[in-house]
Image (spheres, rainbow, N blue to C red):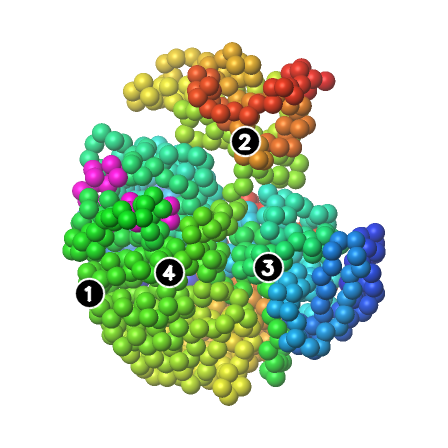
Amino acid sequence: MRKDRTEMSEDDDRSPPLDLRGADIAESSSKTRNCSGVTGPVAGPGPSSMEFQAPYPDQVLENVLENVLQFLSTRRDRNAASLVCKSWCRVEALTRSELFIGNCYSVSPRRATARFARVQAVAIKGRPRFADFNLMPLDWGAHFAPWVNAMAAAYPWLEKVYLKRMSVSDDDLTLLAESFPSFKELVLVCCDGFGTSGLAVIASKCRHLRVLDLIESEVSDDDVDWIACFPESETSCLESLIFDCVECPINFEALERLVVRSPSLKKLRLNRVVSIGQLYRLMVRAPQLTHIGTGSFRAPESVAQGDPEPDYTAAFAACKSLVCLSGFREILADYLPVIHPVCANLTSLNFSYANVDAEQLKSVILHCHKLQTFWVLDSICDEGLQAVAATCKDLHELRVFPIDAREDSEGPVSEVGLQAISEGCRKLQSILYFCQHMTNAAVIAMSNNCPDLEVFRLCIMGRHRPDHVTGAPMDEGFGAIVRNCKKLTRLAISGLLTDRAFSYIGKYGKLVRTLSVAFAGDSDMGLKYVLEGCPRLQKLEIRDSPFGDSALLSGLHHYYNMRFLWMSSCRLSPQGCQEIARALPRLVVEVFGGENGELHGDETVDILYMYRSLEGPREDAPGFVTILQ
Amino acid sequence: MEGSSRSEVCPQLLDLIPKQGEWIANRDGERRHGLSEEKKLELRLAPPGEDWSVKDNTKTNHRDRDESLFSLAYFSPMASMNHNTSINNNSNGSTVFSSPWSSSAYQGQTQHNHQQTKAPSFLQFPSTPQSLPVMAQEASQPCCTKVVDLQSSEKKTFSPSSAKTAVPNSSQKRTAPAPVVGWPPIRSFRKNLASSSSSKPAPESQNAAPDKTATKKPVETCGKGLFVKINMDGVPIGRKVDLKAYDTYEKLSSAVDELFRGLLAAQRDSCAGGVHQKKQEEEKAITGLLDGSGEYTLVYEDNEGDRMLVGDVPWHMFVSTVKRLRVLKSSELSALTLCSSKQDKVPLDSPMK
């Protein structure tokens, strides 16, 4: 459950490993693997008598250790094991096959590949999340290139790469395709910098490719027919092909042939260029699909009036294993009924691109008893949410996106929908809810009705909006969430919020790892409450809130435990940020803003982005970034 | 006030606004973020050349909706950029918006720019207030589409409005919103759904598509360079060339040769079933790109989307209209419809002056 946590803490106050001296001696004399004098299972005499043990028994012990540690799979467990002693650290490093880098600048590729020698799967995250909303300048960094270069040399057996918010170039993809002959899975989430030419190289050269997932990434159109680059002559082992974010036209005939020769294909998410008629052709050839993302879901233009349309309903009915549906771009709601045969089995439904109203939704949702994940637009209104609440008793994750993302738009969903969901979907674990109007009462109700909540993200789109019934700030609602939802790890707050809300978070939000704050708080106390009160806080992103230098200073004890802190348009001064940089040498303190990247003393800092790092200031920082030291 | 200080920076532009003193004086009083209900200023639309008049508008309801949206849309970004409400009264109220990343929408400029940059066509207002006169010219254009575009479509890299807002006290009432960078926190590809997912015919929805790939424009100006994508038949990976680095077609041609010679040879190796890395044939020079005599010919796509032979027009004209380059096999040329302005053709050696 907590597998996402990184437990590595730089200010670990554990005393140094007992075998430090023993290790020095062993390293200088032993030619084989350096064995330290102390290993866990050997009880008895203290460290000093261990120094002169012969290598052989330790070798056996290390072999045993290696075999045992193979069974540790989660990062958290492995990180803990690596802290036991040097020997365990070494063996763990040799047996770790999945490497997770939460911040690509926290450690260098060289250091990571030097420590972990036998990695098969790598996950790297780059930019902070606020970069998705145009708050971060382009070309800030997070380049995949140094990583792929280092891994090409260090991990020739690499099989899987997962990247999030990284800049990946076509050359990087080429190097990847050429360096890793066993390469199997490529997942790019919110990445950019590459185009269809890079995809073409992946398709043509990765002969064992099973997964190619492009999720919410920007892919430039290089006029290259990348689908046709999958080798034609052989059966493909492709299991997942997700390219709904690719905006360019594709060669449908090539795609059809690819699907036909991919008997293992389970997940297929098409882009909006693919018509419903083409979807039909693919579905009849791949009834084994479990995840389908449709393209455009409206009448195909080429069909003349009166021509019989294919039996889409039958095609859906034939997909007996279908559990996840998404896409529905440019939807014509008349076509919705064709998915009825699969609704009863659906566990995941993504309507977040589908402009459907309450009635249209109801016709579908009343069949979806097993639904666990539901993403939808607020066009369904409170009435639609009530229908969801009535049917989807097993709902774990709900996301309601605004169809009109402006502050002053009409809000079709409100506290009524939230209340209904809280009453109907008691097993809710994660919610993201965009609205214009909200009340404390509804939020409090959700905190009481949904005790399993781990993620609560409420975005009241109008800034500083109070409870629209009572006029009070939204403090009590969010307070109830942190107080009653004992498993809460992620929180995003909005609306009119005073320092009191932050005091609640600091007092009750003991498990909160990720906190997003925008346009909230009254004074430095708000941030102080959180920094002093939330020991598990790892990712803190704040914008447009009145927190200044003294608030920033109050977190000195904690910043080494965090992955990053983002503060934009707050009240920080260069001096304040400088003080942090001086106090914490292993923290990289980046500030953006000022003319030509220079900061003058009397200005406020536009953006502060700071993170712990073993490497010090990065060398690829662009001109507008100043790294304080 | 930094409004007046800005007017000192570019007085000649602001002078075009009548009653600028009144406008700026009104802005002085504005201490809150966004536009308060009482003090909402409005620019009345007028065709270019006529007087702009700026008036205080205390009544917001009896405005024509389109006009109000239009003025709100056009005005409020400037309002938020002009007024500086942060308590430190920093003179960088407009920093967020004239700083590098907003201009990096315009092909990666990283310098701090005060001059007008090439704006995307649907967002005709520029990134600095000095360019207000440009907006005046836009006033005569139909406002509705601009409003929709402005309000709801945000190209990923263009962030016109400052995010600087004042700190409200807890009794802050809700103010009318001025567009703020990155708020609400929705990724750009989730915007424009109302236009793209309703029952409108498909071609209109495709207009929304370009928004998503806005960042990957074919032409980049990184300050000094003019980078254009170039693809070659038979080579899957495209490259980029900096046209500012050359001043003649000949130099461009030899640069293309250098760029692709190695890649082409590598492709030939791999196509010939060569699993090994060693090159079995020598790299052949790519010649005759401009006159049709070689195996390949250089063509380009201009700003109107037409495909043209490279070399037909004077170099400076070529540079100003080229959007991307392609190296095609000469044998395929006749199969393509090329718009070559042969009748206007300037002798090929004229760019070499």
Compare marks 1 and 4 and give the one earlier in the sequence.
1
Front-most of residues A242 and A180: A242
Q: CA distance from mark 3 to mark 4?
A: 24 Å
User: In this figure, which residue is indicated by the disc labeled 2?
Assistant: B306
Residue A472, given in percent of the width and then of the height, sits at 53, 86
C-alpha gap between disc 1 and disc 2: 51 Å
Range covered by the magenta-colored residues: A256-278
What percent of the width, then of the height, locates residue A243?
35, 47
- Chain label for disc 4: A
> Which amino acid type corresponds to the residue marked 1 in the rendered image?
Ala
Amino acid carrying mark 3 in the image: Cys
Q: Indicate the quadrant containing the C terminus of chain B: top left, top right, bottom left or bottom right.
A: top right
* Alpha-carbon span between mark 3 and mark 1: 44 Å
Q: Is residue A510 above or below residue B78?
A: below
Q: Which residue is mark 1?
A: A344
Give the residue number, with chain letter if any, for mark 3.
Answer: B144
Percent x, y for residue A5?
36, 63
Does the CB distance between marks 1 and 2 fall below 8 Å?
no
Around disc 2, counting alpha carbons within 10 Å, would you say few (fewer than 14), some (14 to 19), or many (20 or more)? some
Closer to the eye: label 3 or 2: 3
Query: Does residue A122 appear to the left or right of B314 in the view shown?
Result: left
Amino acid found under the numbered disc labelled 4: Ala
Name the front one of labels 1 and 2: 2
Q: Which residue is mark 4?
A: A354
Identity of the residue drawn at 30% across and 75% down:
A387
How packed mark 3 is, by other alpha carbons closer than 10 Å (few <14, some 14-19, many 20 or more), is some
Percent position (x, y) of residue B176?
Answer: 61, 73
As drawn, A534 above or below A562: below
- B40 and B188: which is toward the camera: B40
Does the magenta segment cover residue B324? no
CA–CA distance in space, label 3 to label 2:
30 Å
- In what element is the residue under mark 1? loop
